[in-house]
Image (spheres, rainbow, N blue to C red):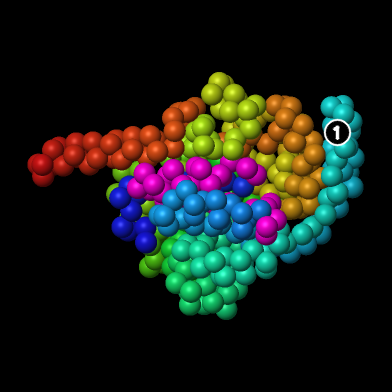
């Protein structure tokens, strides 16, 4: 599947609205590959997005599912008080800090019934029997991993491809478990380091993701053994993306640093530093998705200083070009790098 892409560039699934049918279709039509994000959607909403995307492109695209974790045991009472106080200041009401499975089972049945060409999983491993059910319909299985240990586990349950996520990536870390202590929920590896370690741990095709912005970045991970590069933040400024206006403005300004935090969702995620992140990161419990539901109404106000402004470390390099233009530019830059290296080493 990914070996044959005209342009070895994948648009990452970005839950919360950024991934739209228009964005996915534009990337796939330009020779890359797009992923729809199923996270936080109802089954009906996901079905509609898959249908819309299919009408916009005849090219293959994928769907990403969040694997539900166990119910957190952390005491949320003090954090609920902190978020409630913050919400009152801006005229919002905090949400119910409940646990749910993101309608995982029903979404799994939907992608099975629709025979989605590629299904990727984040936050953990699908059941091995479900992997076989998907494979029986011709679906390619991708699992997001952040360490060699996770890669080995994914290989054991029958994953076809691994998406290796480095610590530079924006939004949620794909770690299987959150240790509740370290900023990233566990071991942190840069993208190239993670890619190298995983390639030496398993014998599976790998996609690299995390802080990749240019054709030279794509060339670097291909040279390190990846079959394709997955980019998320690079597409947030596209007109096709569903990125909120305030988020777009903060990305365009390029003035904020990024940091990992559990403050918005209870799971480590990288975003632009704002007031909410600074004030609540030290107190946020490892309690996903409970914290996500708690803070959702606060984030939905559109107030810049309380929004989850997901972004990778290299976000200042992102552009506002249409998605297809980004894919074409990346292809040109990648080709230039390859040709330059060929000339340098006498293989032109």
Q: Is residue 41 left or right of residue 144?
A: right
Q: Which of the 4 image quadrants contains residue 249?
A: top right
SS state under label 1: loop
| Relative height, residue 214 to residue 63 (above, below) | above
Viewer-nearest residue: 20 or 264:
20
Give, as a single range, the part of the protein colored magenta: 16-44
**Residue 232 at what x, y percent from top left?**
50, 42
Identify which residue is drawn at 16% across, 42% down. 342
Q: Is residue 21 above or below residue 278?
A: below
Q: Badge 1 is on which residue?
A: 92
Residue 37 picture location, percent across and down: 58, 51
> Which residue lies at the image location 44% right of the left edge and 33% below the top edge?
322
Q: Quadrant of the C terminus?
A: top left
Q: Position of residue 166 (x, y in %)?
A: 49, 48
Does any portion of residue 83 appear in the rendered image?
Answer: yes
Q: How many marks?
A: 1
């Amino acid at each position: 599947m990914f070996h044959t892409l005209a342009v070895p560039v994948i648009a990452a699934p970005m839950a919360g609205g950024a991934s739209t049918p228009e964005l996915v279709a534009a990337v796939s039509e330009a020779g890359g590959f797009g992923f729809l994000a199923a996270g936080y959607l109802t089954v009906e909403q996901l079905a509609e997005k898959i249908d819309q995307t299919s009408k916009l492109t005849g090219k293959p695209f994928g769907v990403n599912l969040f694997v539900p974790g166990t119910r957190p045991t952390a005491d949320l009472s003090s954090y609920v008080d902190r978020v409630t106080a913050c919400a009152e200041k801006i005229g919002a009401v905090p949400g119910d800090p409940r646990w749910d499975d993101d309608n995982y089972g029903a979404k799994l049945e939907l992608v099975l019934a629709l025979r989605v060409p590629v299904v990727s999983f984040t936050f953990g491993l699908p059941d091995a029997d479900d992997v076989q059910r998907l494979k029986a319909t011709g679906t390619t299985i991708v699992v997001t991993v952040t360490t060699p240990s996770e890669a080995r586990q994914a290989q054991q349950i029958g994953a076809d491809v691994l998406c290796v996520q480095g610590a530079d990536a924006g939004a949620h870390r794909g770690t299987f478990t959150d240790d509740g202590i370290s900023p990233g929920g566990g071991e942190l590896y840069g993208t190239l380091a993670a890619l190298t370690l995983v390639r030496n741990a398993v014998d599976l095709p790998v996609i690299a993701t995390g802080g990749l912005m240019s054709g030279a970045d794509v060339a670097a991970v291909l040279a390190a053994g990846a079959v394709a590069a997955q980019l998320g933040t690079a597409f947030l400024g596209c007109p096709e993306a569903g990125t909120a206006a305030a988020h777009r403005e903060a990305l365009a300004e390029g003035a904020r640093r990024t940091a990992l935090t559990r403050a918005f969702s209870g799971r480590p995620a990288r975003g632009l530093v704002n007031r909410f992140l600074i004030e609540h990161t030290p107190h946020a419990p490892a309690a996903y998705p409970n914290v996500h539901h708690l803070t959702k109404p606060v984030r939905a106000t559109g107030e810049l200083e309380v929004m989850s402004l997901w972004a990778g470390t290299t976000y200042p390099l992102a552009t506002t070009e249409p998605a297809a233009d980004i894919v074409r530019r990346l292809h040109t830059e990648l080709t230039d790098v390859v040709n330059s290296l060929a000339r340098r080493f006498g293989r032109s």
